[in-house]
Image (spheres, rainbow, N blue to C red):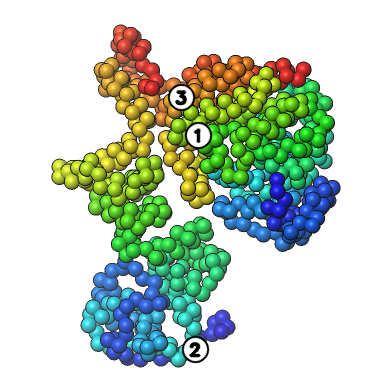
Amino acid sequence: MDLSKIKRVIIEEGADRYAQTFNILSKFDGQDCEIIRHPDERVEYPVNSSQMDKGTLRLIEFKGEFLKPCPGTKEYICCGYQILNVGTNCPMNCSYCILQAYFNKPSLRLFINIEENLERICEIIDNNPEKTFRIGTGEFTDSLAIDPIADWTGYLPKYFSKRKNAVLEFKTKTDCINGLLKSQYRDRIIVSWSLNSRCIASKEEHGAPSISKRLKCARICQEEGYVLAFHFDPLIFHDRWKEEYARTLDLLDKYIDPKKIIWVSMGCLRFMPRFKDIFKNRHPESKIIYNEFIPGLDGKMRYFKPLRIEMYSFMREKISEFYEDIGLYLCMESDSIWKDSMKWSPGDSRGLAEFLDKRVEFFFN
Amino acid sequence: MKAGEIRGVETPLLIRTALIDETPGPFCMSFGFSIDALKDSIKKTGLINPLIITKNSNNKYIIVAGYRRLMAIKHLRIQDSYCIDVSESGRSPRDLLLLNFYDNLSTRVFNDVEKGMILNRLSAHFSQDELKKDFMPLLKIGNSNDLDLFLKIGTLDNHIKYALTNGAVSLKTLRLLLTLDEESREALCSLIESIKINSKYQYYLTEYLIDISQIEKKSIRDILGEEQHGAILNDKKANNPQKSKKLLRLIWSRRYPNLSNSIKQFKKGIARLNLPGKIKIDFLSYFEAPDYRLEILFRDGEELVEDIEFLLGMKEKIRVIKDPW
C-alpha cells in the first residue's frame, strides 16, 4: 500500500500503550501525514458517511473479541470459518463491498493490541484439540492491503504455523506480498485471492490490482511454498458473464498449479436491503444492483434462485475442466442450491466444515 | 436581549392592507393551506392578533408573521388592518425569521413542504449542525440525516409540493422521486396523482421504474409513455385501484422477469391439478425456501381423511410438482 495515501493517523485512547502503535508511526516518519494523538481531537463522522474517510488510519485498542465465528445464519450452509479481527475497512473501494453497510465507522481501523491477545487466542485453539480452526483475517478488511503498515504477515504466522489444529488464511485482492515472502513460515498458512471476471475487477473493484496481477502474485507465493486458495465471491451477473468468468478461469489455469489449491469458494452477490441506497449514493455509475434480487431467508438480498443455480453450475463445470479435486464449495447457500448446482451437498454447516477440515488435514498433516 | 425581556413594545397601528405586499416574501413559512377557517374567524371576531410587518429595501411593507391572516384579510377585502411595524426595531432578518418561526411553531403543525421551506430559510443564517441539533427536533424531524431531503423539498416545483402536502405523494416516495431527473419526476408524480395510487404501491412503483430505467437505459417518462401502460390508464371500465394494481403488476413483471415467469409456470402447473378451492399448494419466500406448502381447510377429521384420500387419488399428477425452472 502506498503510504502517501494516508493523510492522517489518529491514535485513539489507550492505543499509545502498545509497541505496535510506535512501529506503525515510525513508518510515517518523513511522510506528509498529520498525526493526532489526543483522543479529544477525534473527529466524529455521521453514520453512513459517504466518503468512508479512507485517507485516515485509526490505531485502536480493540476491546472486543478478536476471534469470532463467521456470522453465518441457520438458513444457509456456513463453512464454520473463524474471523481473526485485526481491523476493519480497507483502502480499496469495491462497489459491492458489504462493509459499507456493515460498519458505520469510517477510516481504516487497525487494532494494535492483537499481538498481546494472541496467546489467549492460541489457548482457545489448544484447549479444543478435536476442532480444526480455519481462521482468516480477510473478512472485515483485506488481509494484505494494509500489511505494509500493520505487518500482520510479520507477527501472526508464527502463532498458527506451529499448531496442529489451526490454519491461518490471508485473503486479499492485492499484490502486497512482500511481507509474506519475507516470512519464514509456510506451514498451516494459506494465501488466498478474491477473483472475479476482468470486467467486474476493472469496473467495480476500484483500487484493486488486475486479475492477472493477482494471479502472478499468487504464482509467486505458490512457488515460495505457500498453499493457495481462491474465492469467487461475489459472482456477479453482467454482459457476457460466462465468457468473462471463463477467461479468469483460463488465467487461473495458466498461472497456478491446481494441486496446491486447498479450496475455492463461490458466492453470488448478496447484500442487506439498506445497502442498496448506500450503494447508489457511493457508486452511481455501477449497475450491478439492478438485477433480480429477492429477499433471502436470512433477510439479505440474493439473486433469484435459478439464476444462482445457473451461475454456480457454469462455474463448477468450468472449474472441473481445470481440476476436479479443488475443494470447491459454496459460501452461505442452501442445501437445494448445492444439490442443483454442485451435484452434491454437505447437507448442513457441520458437513461443510468437515469437508473443509479434511482438506486442511490432507494439505497440512 | 435577556430571557424574559419584552423587546421593543411596538404598538399596533392601522395600516392600509393594499400597502402590504401579498407575495410570500423572505419570512413566509406557509404552504398548501386553506384560509376558510381564518376568514370565518375574522368575519365573526375581527383580527385577534395583529400582523407583523417590516419594510423591504424598496420601502414597501412585507409580511413577517401572519401571512395566512393577510391572505384572509385580502380575500375579505378589509381595507385597514392592525399591524405591528418592526422596521425600526433594530431586528435583523435572522431575528425576524426566528420571530415568525416561533410564532408559527407555538400555534400550529407544519406540513413537510413548510418544514423544507423553514430549513431552507434558516440555512441562510445557521450551520447544518445547528439546523440538525436545534431546529429539526422542533420541526419533529426525527432523523437528522433527512436534512438534505427537506432542503431539497424547499426547492421543488409547486406541483410536487402540492402533491406532497395533500398526501397524494408520500414522503417515502418523494425520497425516491428526488433521485430522478425533473422530467421523469414530473411524469411519475402526475401518474401517481391521476390514479391516486396508495402510498405503499406508489413507493414500489417508483422503485421498480427507477430500476427498469437503469436496466433498460430508458427514461421513466418514456417507459410510462409506452402503449401497454396507456391502455391500462385509459381503460374506462376500470376504477383507480384496479388500474394501479394492474399497472404495478405489469411493471413488477418487467422488473422481475424470471421470478414472474416462474410464478406463472408454477401456478399454471398447480391449476392443472384442478384442486378444490379448500386445498391450496403454494411456494414460499420467492421460491427461496426449500419446501412448498400444502394447505387444507377441513371441518372435521372425516372431511380431512376424505381430502387426503382425494389427494392420494391423484398421486401421479401431484408427483410432477417441481421447481418451475
Q: Which residue is mark 2?
A: B90
Is A139 left or right of A281, judged from the image as shown?
right
**Secondary-structure class at tag 1:** loop
Q: Is residue B166 above or below residue B101?
A: above
**Secondary-structure class at tag 3:** helix
Q: Is residue A60 above or below residue A120?
A: below
Query: What residue is at 56 percent from the left and 53 percent from the top?
Result: A50
Query: What residue is at 59 percent from the left and 28 percent from the top?
Result: A251
Q: Which residue is mark 1?
A: A236
Q: Is residue A233 above or below residue B20?
A: above
**Secondary-structure class at tag 2:** loop
For the image, the number of numbered tags is 3
Is B25 left or right of B42, judged from the image as shown?
right
Q: Which residue is mark 3?
A: A310
Q: Give whichever of B12, B135 is nearer the camera.
A: B135
The percent coordinates of residue A156 (x first, y second) are: 79, 35
The percent coordinates of residue B65 (x first, y second) are: 39, 79
Query: Mark 2 and mark 1 in contact (Cβ < 8 Å)?
Result: no
Is B139 left or right of A139, judged from the image as shown?
left
